[in-house]
Amino acid sequence: MKRRHVVFALALAAWIAGSTLGTVSPAGPQRASAAPFLEIGQAHAGYVPTLNGTSPIFILFIGSDARPGQPVAGERTDSIHLVGINPAKHKASILGFPRDSWVEIPGHGMDKINSAMVFGGPDLTVQTVEALTGIKIDYWALTSFDGMTQMIDAIGGLTVDVPFAMQDSYSRADFQPGVQHLDGRQVLAFARDRHSLPSGDFGRSEDQGRVFVAALAQFRKEFSKDPSRLLTWIGAGLRNVQTNVPLDQILNLAFTCSTVNPKYVENMVVPGTTGMVGNMSTVNLSSSASVIYNDMKNDGLVQPKHIPPSPNAALLGG
Amino acid sequence: MWIVPAAVVVLGAVLFFVLRSGGGVAGILNSGPDNTIPPFNFKIGKATPISVAKADAKPLAGSAKNAASQVAKTMTTLYTEAFLDPVNWRGGTYDEVWSLFDGSSQAAAQKEGTTLTLGTTAGDTFEKVDQPRGRVSVKVLLDGKDQPATAVAIVKFTALGTNKDGTLTLIVSSGQYFLRPGSDGWRIYAFEVSRADHEKIPKPGPSGSPSAVAS
């Protein structure tokens, strides 16, 4: 009886094996068509994480007046920009402050806004802007002329849409209008020129904002082609910027920036009028600026109706 | 006594089928699917250091290489679990894959399961997946203390899927993964990956018979 069972089992196994062979024998050679049959479409999985909350992020960008060899944090600021990012709407706004703005510096009374850096470094500059605007700033980033030049060179230059002709022997700006690829020294000249602008420092502050927008546009373009370029940008940035932001948060910020469309970035300068205090030339910020601050505070963005006219309107034909 | 020659005949038939199928006796006695995982390791290409402190990062090549080797391990585990382990793709579950993603990226990765894995219905499509090949280049961002802070793995992976109808599919996955080091190895926190599978037409062999080698 036992033998019978064995034989039956073997016969069954043979039958199963035969059946199986029958079903798996390749039918491939019969397929003559070379037309591809796509199994799964191109699906881009998208980046995570991005800071996609509804709360805006505010970053204060500070450009130091320090020349090579000078301490970056101990010199006056040459440029101050408050950037509000709305991650949920993928939009941002850039608000430039004229460096001679006559404001209250916490603990130091009224003075030019750019003196805050001399009195108390980036922290006091942040406090000064917070006191002026009522906006709580999340991060600050500080760079110098030298740092900016090196940063731009490290990413291979920056493509900037120069809005009007600029010739200035002080900054060495010498540009015809139009889209052009600039090296670090040229970008610095573009960002520093105020002598060829009728509105002086107001117009320059707006041009500095243009550099931010140009950088964002280029970053997005490179990032979409090769996401690993993000590391090159972060490396170049951090080698030339002092910041209080931890590296992992910088990565998050970079991912967030990759979602902001430069077309939806409003670049503006706080309006004001020039004046004198003693023998110092100053800027008295317009009382209408509070409307901009309050608007920006809500969601990081400024509604079109609150955006002040461009200080370079005369050159732009506006 | 008739039973002895009968058994010999049946045994002969079994041996014939065993030899024809290329399988072993175990394969016949165990009629379930073959769950053997094809051996696979990513080949490491370029390991590029990028420093937040030093413009010339060439002296940090050693650190980048070490990090790249760890990153490659994670990527090998990822692709093995996502495309090669028959238990996973036959069952349509990829828990080991999701555990390689950290934080909020886990949910995003699961949403993109059809791109990042062979998919939940792969068991209905494929009979077998083998001949894996993969290459990974790694860019490593080193912090102010020259420690790896994050890395980008740029991968290209292919494997050959044998469909149930006998046709062949070249499984192609390529893209970039952002990883950071953790206590239990490198984990993925961002990714941009695409799949471009296509039919694989077997090359005719020397005698005109088909050959199923992935190109």
Image: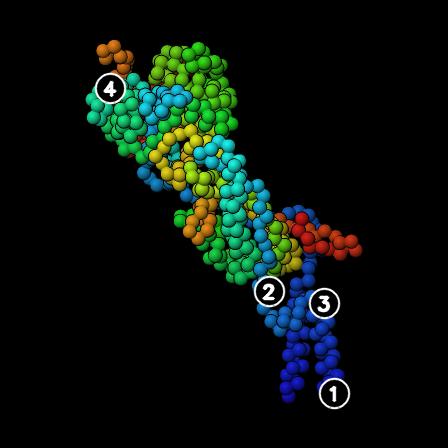
Give the chain letter at badge 1.
B
Whole-number angstrom distance, CA of label 3 to CA of label 1: 28 Å
Whole-number angstrom distance, CA of label 4 to CA of label 1: 116 Å
Q: Quadrant of the N terminus of chain A?
A: bottom right
A134 in relation to B72, above or below: above
Mark 4 or 2: in front is 4
Residue B20's disc is: 3
- SS for tag 4? strand
Q: Left or right: where does residue A9 sit relative to residue B147?
A: right
Q: Which residue is mark 2?
A: B34
Give the chain letter at badge 4.
A
- SS for tag 2? loop
Residue A270 in percent (x, y) is at 30, 21
| Amino acid type at mark 3 | Arg
- The answer to whether tags 4 and 3 share a subunit is no
Give the chain letter at badge 3.
B
Residue under the point 48% across and 54% down:
B97
- SS for tag 1? loop
Whole-number angstrom distance, CA of label 4 to CA of label 3: 93 Å
Which of A210 and B208 lies nearest the eye of the viewer? A210
Q: Is residue B92 visible?
A: yes
Whole-number angstrom distance, CA of label 2 to CA of label 3: 17 Å
